[in-house]
Image (cartoon, coloured by chain):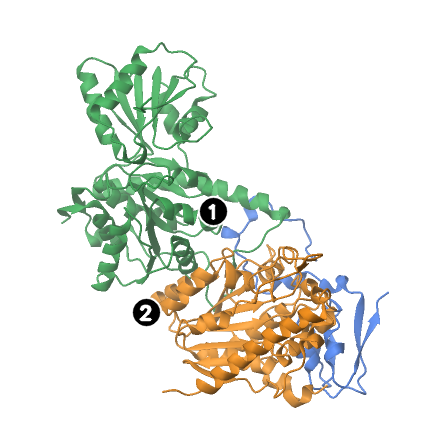
Chain colours: A green, B blue, C orange
Amino acid sequence: MAKRVGMEVALAVAEAVGQCNIDMAAVYPITPQSHIGEHLSDLVADGKIDAEFVTVESEHSAISAIIGASGTGARVYTATSSQGLMLMHEILPIASAMRLPLVMGIANRAVSGPLNILNDHSDIMPQRDCGWISLFVENGQEAIDLSIQAFKIAEHKEVNLPVCVNIDGFQLTHMVEPVEFPDQELVDKFLPARVPFATLHPSKPVTMGAFSMADYFTEIMKAKDEALKNSKKTILAVWAEWAKMFGRTYKPVETYKAEGAEILLLTMGSMSETAELAIDELRAKGLAVGLVKLRLWRPFPFAEIKEVLLSAKKVLVTDRAVSFGGPGGPVCSEIKAALYNEKDRPTIYNCIIGLGGRDVTVADFASMIKKVAEEEANKNADTYEFWGVRE
Amino acid sequence: MTKKSGPAGWQEITTGCVVLRPGSASEYHTGSWRAQRPVWNNQKCIKCGICYVFCPEGCVAQSEDGYFKANLDYCKGCGICAHECWSRAIAMVEEG
Amino acid sequence: MNIVENFDLFAPRLINKKELLSSGHRACQGCGEVLAVRLMCKALGENTVIASATGCMEIISSMYPTTAWELPWIHVAFENAAAVASGVEAGLKALRRKGKIADRDIKVVGMAGDGGTMDIGMQALSGAMERGHNMLFVCFDNEAYMNTGIQRSSGTPMGASTTTAPAGKVSMGQKTWKKNMAEIMVAHNVPYVATACPSYPLDFIRKVEKAKKVKGPSYIHCFSVCPTGWRCPSDQAVSLGRLAVETGIFPLFEVENGKYKLSSEMPKKLTPIKNYFKSQGRYRHLGEDEINMIQGGVDREYRKLLNKVQCLAAWD
């Protein structure tokens, strides 16, 4: 029987990873990720996981070490936040080019400067073009489920790509939530042993991480792009299998009371739960509003996004990071790009919210939506707003 | 390059651009870089093998008769073998 | 020529015949570094996995879709070879323990140039050595960033001219003493540290074999002559390495569990460094005073080493 317990989400993530028969993990401390690494090392120390836990001297070495271990055919894991992810940045596109099925938990946190330890998405957004599959979770249960699914997706023979699971730092990682762990027997059934396409072993010497000049580089980049786009099929199949085995459904784009909505609010991550309350409030007042939650950031789900957004007149995209000197938020840019070729596309509004741990309340979401509702739909919506910024 | 066809298209790129053919760099012949080539005088050669040990290309090999010679497909003509040969059995001779 | 004194006449018979780095690699003519790598591979044998840093040895050996390597080999980036090697070691260890791969001893070897070891790779190397992984790390030191065009590193010796510390009207080139990397590794208390040079192939091979047998971290600092960067004739890669040793500029020694030992190849009396400098373009600008100043530094360092050999030969 699945076990239902109250647990801090960071610990629950470590427990879930522990259910996946990992062979090696390398983690470096950083707030608010640290509880994941600490608890993983507890599980190793207690013999609950048979894995090498490598206490590296930096996040750069954490990602490098798990690449080395993954090259041998091992199932590997790391977790980080913010500056740690920025330090890993150089290695992220190498991991995806090498097509190694790494799994990384990210306790999302604002990027310095100034130094700030609290939650936003400014750490993951600069990693957008690194060729990783990038998933967002809303609550502790999703954090558990996606952490397990991540291995299956990453290691699938049609995929072989690294996967990161974005879990909002503090707001989610440090919450104690009721969560349910899937039965170990079922996890084992769901997640078979990794079958690597090549391994570092003297029985069959291979060269990994070869050097390429202009004659092959374009083809290698195209192959990587196709692999990432193609991974969506597997992601959908894995989610279908999960739903069948564990009864919880996941989709690239999820909705809440979006039917017949004229205004759609778009969120990512743990703020979606707050946004739902605002939608409830406004629906009760008779406003035709709904919520769209973006779960799959890469590969970007163009078809699914179009399907849900095109029926609305206005879309309010919230971003938790800034593309400085650019079009506003990175999520909004993507949404606009997805809808650009559509004739009857909705007007897009963009609010940048919740930077560096700034609280966003139900009332905030309600005010944002009301403001959009009052504006006449027009093409002047190319602006973006730092919501709640003091003048 | 002795490859018969042109470079592979993107669909033929090996997963993760892993190279599965160990030692395949030998398809590329570095001998064309050479300006001078080593010539052994077997009358002076004492078969010590220093030329073999010190060749950065690993292209000097011992024949069945015990004497050494360089594989000119790869020899870059650096001259280390001639310089190190203590019995002065190797001379560097201009190519062409 | 006293090679025969120091060199077994029938060297090839003692050396592993199998080439594990194939011909066709793109190293420059007379590259002392690729020679060292070739000899290292012979000493390591087939039960080896190599993690290489970015650098000359990486680009000359792994031009996609081909490879010169006959050993399992991985390259990720410049500064992280030691971290990657530590991951390979941890991965193999776990898979072996869990019965997922055959029960077989495999030595993991990290390799990098002087930049990838002493500068940008220092942190990852320090971490890997401190953590005690069962791995050997070999630094192939050609005393500058040769792959990017002869820029100075912390391995560049005093007085050498490089493209970022050039000799000029008011500069003698490099104005700092070479970082003593082997001593930094000794300070990590790893079981085995050695310096080596491919000009002494049997000594080098023996040291690699010794390091391979260590259960835990070991480090070899290998002097690698670079004719391109040092502006010397390509046929002198081996003889210059020998001169570096004979002048005491690059002394050969071993430190086993903290105990120092000078290698038997070291001469009783050192040769003046000007003999070593004269065929190298990177030192051509140096005047007598400067050479004397550098000679003073070389002598001082060598005396320091001899003192350690004397005082730390056996202490427990």
Say if residue A338 shows up in the picture. Answer: yes
Q: Which residue is outermost to the top? A: A376
Specify the quadrant of the image occupied by residue C244. bottom right
Where is residue A281 drawn, in percent x and y? 18, 19
| Discs 1/2, front | 1
Residue at 49 percent across and 40 percent down: it is A226
Q: Is residue C264 above or below residue B92?
A: below
Judging from the image, what secondary structure is the residue with disc 1 in? Answer: helix
- Taking the image as shown, residue A206 lies to the left or right of residue A331, namely right
Q: Is residue A162 above or below residue C146?
A: above
Dot 1, crowdedness within 10 Å: few (<14), some or many (≥20)?
Answer: some
**Residues marked 1 and 2, same chain:** no
Where is residue C296 drawn, in percent x and y? 61, 75
Q: Which amino acid does label 1 sit on?
A: Pro
Q: Mark 1 points at which residue?
A: A93
Where is residue C297 drawn, in percent x and y? 59, 73
- Taking the image as shown, residue C47 lies to the left or right of residue A105, namely right
Q: Which amino acid does label 2 sit on?
A: Arg
Specify the quadrant of the image occupied by residue A332. top left
Where is residue C84 drawn, in percent x and y? 44, 60
Judging from the image, what secondary structure is the residue with disc 2 in? Answer: helix
Q: Say which quadrant the C terminus of chain A sits in.
A: top left
Specify the quadrant of the image occupied by residue A116. top left
Please state which of residues A210 and C241 is positioned toward the viewer in this rendering: C241
Q: CB atoms at circles 1 and 2 under 8 Å apart?
A: no
Q: Name the residue under label 2.
A: C97
**Residue C114 — which label?**
none
Distance from Cα at disc 1 to Cα at disc 2? 31 Å
Q: Is residue C1 above or below residue A138?
A: below
- Taking the image as shown, residue A329 lies to the left or right of residue C41, namely left
